[in-house]
Amino acid sequence: MIRRHTLVLFAALLVVASGISFAQNPSPAAAPPQAKDTILKVADINGQLFPTTVFFSGRTATSQMDNVGGVRYADGHLVLAALVDSSGYASQIRMKYQGYLITEVEIFISGQTLKPGAYGFGFLDNNKFVAMDLGANDVLQATSTRDADIRHPMPLQIVAGAEAGDYRLYHGRDYIEFHRQGH
Amino acid sequence: MAGHCASVALLAGALCLFAQTAPPKEHAQTVQPPAVYFEDLAGRTGLTALNVYGGDTHKEFIIEQPGNGAVIFDYDNDGWPDIFLPNGSTIEGFPPGQAPTGHLYHNNHDGTFTDVTVKAGLAHAGWAQGACVGDYDNDGYLDLVVTYWGQTILYHNNGDGTFTDVTEKAGLKTSGSPWSTGCSFIDYDRDGKVDLFLSRYVDFSYETAPHPGQGLTCTWKGLDVSCGPRGLKPGVNALYHNNGDGTFTDVSEKSHIRPTSECFGFTSLTADFDQDGWPDIYVTCDATANLLYHNNQDGTFTEMAQQAGVAYNEDGFVQSGMGLTAGDYTHDGLQDVVQTNFTDDSPTVYLNRGGMNFDDVTFTAGLAKIRNWLGWGVQFYDFDNSSWPGILIVNGHVYPEVDGKGLGTSYREPRVLYYNLHDGTFANITADAGPALSEKHSGRGLALGDLFNDGHEEALVNNMNEKPSLYYNTKPVGNFISLQLIGVKSNRAAIGAVVTLESGDGQYAQEVRSGGGFISQSDLRLHFGLGKAATAEKIVIRWPSGLVETLQNLPANHFYVVREGSGIDPSMTHGPSSTPAYIAAPK
């Protein structure tokens, strides 16, 4: 049993480590001159950019590859998010750990900083958003906004915000806005 | 409206825009629900065989969760609908010769049924799931498909009361053990021969499946429970083209069904949702986005559930779709949708706005209040012949382990009956409909049909690890007409035909449909309640071939047989039969 846990932990660390090494080795050369930020959809991300399983708080979970989104900044850096299979069936109790966020750059959410890394996140009752480190410790809490105007909301999507350089991470009708340092 | 959108190009934009933004049709007068009293007649009719499906106090694997559909169809063409109830198995299995099988019940025309399973050649053991009917060889007798975890079976109806397993001969043999759940016959290319769609759930095997508690997806509210569906690999839906010589060809890839079928598929049904004359396919998906395959009219489909607004609920969340029904509850001629979902969620009502646009109107329709039951079979159900279909939902949890845990739910759960208030809303009248519906069962399949030919439509329920239920409304009901369509150029069973009852009250459309409920099959005859009307003023039939026929001033309370191109067949049309004597006098 111990050996099995060790193996799972090792594999999980590899997953995280691969994300981090990717973060440290962006390929700005690949970005065309004067390139603009690109919003990434499911088809852009697929299994290529986002890990199919992720590690969080001692367990691995399957990423929902049809519920992923992201931003590729003009310099090639990425912010990616996906929902994860954190239970066999959902319940009305909104779990804290709903999704997984990978950011290669420092981003700001409600004036707070989220450093490059991998995080668990959840949109909770009473308009709360929480990001957690891989040990399930809260590292950022923010107030989410409810968007009553979307006709057909989706479980997860990233779209452009109101200001240039602002992006919204949506979970259904709830969203938080983020931007990169200097934007 | 949407039909105009499809055919009048220049005007289409404006009309479709209107269709998207128009509010639900509203009627000035909200009605009061009538007196309704349901009795469960199953025991008195002879429907007594026990369903066997997995553990009853503990379920180790997800294969033990879904249960079975229910089928009402007239297999011997005697004008009296018969019943088929698929059956399952257990993980432990059974000694040779003792395994449970599905049951075919012959209608004795006197309110009773006789189990003719063995004589009919349908005694087959295994993990059966659902079933559907259609006449794939157009010989005039309805054939039967039974889905399985393992090999799904096509039974050819021999026309003499027996069936033959023609799966291999028909080219439907599959490798491995795909877990097919829902099925629907559909003439997607309108060549007059019904094709076959299969929805699939999970890529499952005992060898690879984790056990309760082994991972995040093997717990629920702190309980160790059977794992999945999240965390498991989804099955892959399939479409088979009917070659017209008794064989089928797998066209899943070519038709674009396979590449866009990432879902834990349960119930499928077919409907011409955008009224373009070509049948579309809707699949409820468990814990994944629903699928809506729009027919491109060239042998291919485009999956467009998200664009159409039926992939998720109003808040953009994935639901756990189980059962499915389509019907015109607002009398605008469009097929609306209700699907049942997991517990801690309500059923979902999708109002069809036309032009492949739906809105989740669950809250305003009045179905958002009950969230503690786990829904399976669902049918739009005109149980008082008012012509405004209500909704019947059967429930039951997937985890027996929830009992006694104080979670506000239970393994066995009551049915829920909604009355259509004619204004786009429904009233829950379960408590006023007699005690039978409030008795708790782990219900699954649900099919409708007028089994006694007396003008009352019955609701047949396949209960997990119990005997079935057969619900009959003993209170007086309104007038009705029943239509059996016989295709000539179209497929013989007329699957895909759209029949619209036009009156001063709007237009009420029904389709001859394969699938729905929860992996079930209702009687193919269309039952139209007429309320107090003595005649059906105008009936418009759009056959799958494209032929449009109009019938006028049909006297109420008759069972009509309509042959494509030649109208009503008087020799096969008849009035209602007497209600079986054992049914209590109206209370």
Image (cartoon, rainbow, N blue to C red):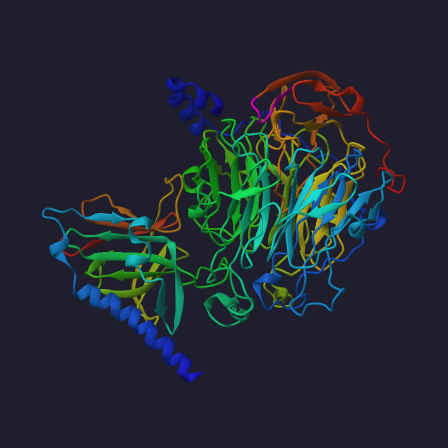
Residue at x 40%, y 83% (from the top left corner):
A3
Q: Nearer the viewer, residue B215 or B202?
A: B202
Q: Is residue B542 magenta?
A: yes
Q: Residue at x 40, y 79 (%)?
A: A5
> Looking at the image, which residue is at 81% across and 46% down?
B41
Q: Position of residue A89 (x, y in %)?
A: 50, 59
* A160 shown above or below A64: above
Residue B329 rendering spot, x and y as whole percentages: 60, 32
- Up the image or down, B212 lies above or below B241; here it is below
**Number of marks in the rendered image:** 0
Q: Is residue B225 left or right of residue B485?
A: left
| Direction from residue B451 to residue B305 in the image, left or right | left
B217 vs A10, nearest the viewer? A10
- Please tell me whether residue B513 is drawn above or below residue A39 in the rendered image: above
The span shown in magenta is B538-546
- Nearest to the observer: residue A35 or residue B164: B164
Q: Residue B499's image quarter?
A: top right
- The answer to whether residue B325 of the structure is visible from this angle is no
Residue A46: x, y in percent?
33, 54
- Rendering quarter of residue B30: top right
For the N terminus of chain A, give its image quadrant: bottom left
At which x and y percent is residue B151? 60, 55
Q: Residue furthest top?
A: B552
| In the image, farthest residue toward the bottom | A2
- Residue B59 inside the magenta-drawn segment: no
Say if residue B50 shows up in the picture: yes
In this rendered view, identify the residue nearer to me: A35 or B563.
B563
